């Protein structure tokens, strides 16, 4: 006597160990989808030697477990509950309510709020809050993906988002696909990531890819880090990027943003001037930066 538990998210899949049992008499609990029941040729009820069910808590399943019968179930796969989250998002969308009135742009403020709430949870060292805020951020990913799915020009789904991530990780982390086993040297890993990223993006400017909409302090840090990696001389960095005046006139955020955006513009002009002079875009040396650096 055996109980076969089907995956509630994929009831059409049967655990490999249970396949030989499908040729004998089968009974199904009422939670097994009709299409699966018909395919298996199973009868309703629970009196056959093998019982097929979906819910481990079903009374017929619990009764057989109490009698000591064997239970065959597919082991849970990490991440399988993400499918439930995708299903819930689809159901919410299907109701045609508030969700379908939203756009990528209208959700921007929620994405920003959830990101800062997640950072708060990390700062506070709160594991329960961290789990909740990660869920809220996941909702934003599902929501934006569902909106994109309805696009009339360039639609994509949450599966496409996942595929894009997996492809990017495989390209930038060769140890995922080259048969490497065991620990990896962190320095080598970071170097391989940067080389792969540079080849993939082929960006003409050392500042390309920086999110200019991020807060001014984070933006300044990113711009200075990128320019330093590109060999930009530290003495050419303007003093306005080295300090923030909180009590000065106007907004400290806007003052710093104006300064760093102007600095980024000068970097791009220097790169363009060097390319125009040399006829080819290539890395600048410290002397090159000084030569092509435009006046403020």
Image (spheres, rainbow, N blue to C red):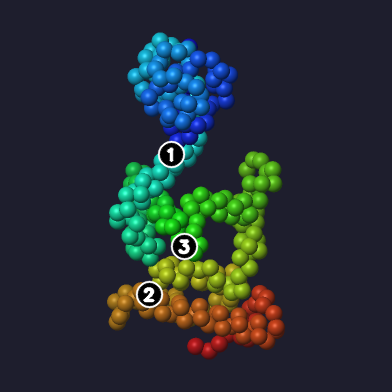
Q: Classify 81 as above or below 227.
A: above
Residue 205 horizontal side relative to residue 54, left or right:
right
Residue 143 horizontal side relative to residue 188, left or right:
left
Residue that appears at 30% across and 54% down: 97
Q: In the drawing, what numbered circle is on residue 81?
A: 1
Q: Are marks 2 and 3 in contact (CB under 8 Å)?
A: no
Q: Are marks 2 and 1 in contact (CB under 8 Å)?
A: no
Could you tell me if residue 144 is visible in this image? Answer: no
Residue 59 rendering spot, x and y as whole percentages: 34, 19
- Give whichever of 290, 103 is nearer the camera: 103
Of labels 2 and 1, earlier in sequence is: 1
Q: Classify 292 as above or below 64.
A: below
Residue 36 rendering spot, x and y as whole percentages: 47, 29
- The residue most toward the bottom is 295
Q: In the drawing, what numbered circle is on residue 152?
A: 3
Q: Nearer the viewer, mark 3 or mark 1?
A: 3
Kindly identify which residue carries mark 2: 244
Quick one: label 3, few (<14), some, or many (20+) residues within 10 Å?
Answer: few
Residue 93 horizontal side relative to residue 156, left or right:
left
Could you tell me if residue 229 is visible in this image? Answer: yes
- The residue most toward the top is 67
């Amino acid at each position: 006597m055996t109980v076969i538990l089907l995956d509630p998210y994929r009831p059409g899949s049967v655990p490999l160990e249970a396949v030989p049992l499908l040729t004998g008499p089968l009974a199904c609990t009422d939670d097994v989808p009709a299409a699966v029941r018909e395919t298996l040729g199973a009868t309703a009820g629970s009196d056959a030697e093998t019982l097929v069910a979906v819910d481990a808590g079903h009374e017929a399943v619990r009764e057989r477990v109490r009698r000591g019968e064997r239970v065959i179930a597919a082991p849970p796969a990490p991440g399988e509950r993400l499918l439930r989250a995708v299903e819930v998002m689809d159901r919410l969308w299907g109701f045609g309510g508030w969700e379908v009135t939203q756009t990528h742009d209208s959700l921007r403020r929620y994405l920003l709020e959830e990101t800062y709430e997640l950072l708060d949870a990390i700062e506070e060292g709160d594991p329960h809050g961290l789990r909740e805020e990660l869920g809220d951020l996941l909702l934003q990913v599902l929501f934006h993906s569902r909106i994109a799915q309805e696009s009339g020009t360039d639609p994509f789904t949450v599966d496409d988002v996942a595929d894009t991530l997996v492809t990017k990780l495989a390209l930038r982390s060769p140890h995922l696909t080259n048969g490497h086993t065991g620990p990896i040297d962190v320095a080598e890993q970071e170097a391989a990531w940067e080389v792969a990223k540079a080849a993939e993006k082929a960006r003409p400017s050392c500042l390309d890819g920086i999110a200019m909409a991020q807060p001014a302090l984070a933006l300044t840090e990113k711009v200075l880090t990128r320019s330093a990696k590109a060999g930009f001389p530290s003495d050419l960095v303007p003093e306005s990027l080295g300090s923030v005046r909180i009590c000065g006139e106007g907004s400290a955020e806007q003052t710093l943003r104006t300064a760093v955006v102007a600095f980024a513009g000068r970097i791009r002009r220097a790169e363009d001037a060097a390319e125009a002079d040399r006829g080819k875009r290539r890395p600048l040396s410290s002397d090159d930066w000084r030569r092509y650096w435009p006046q403020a």
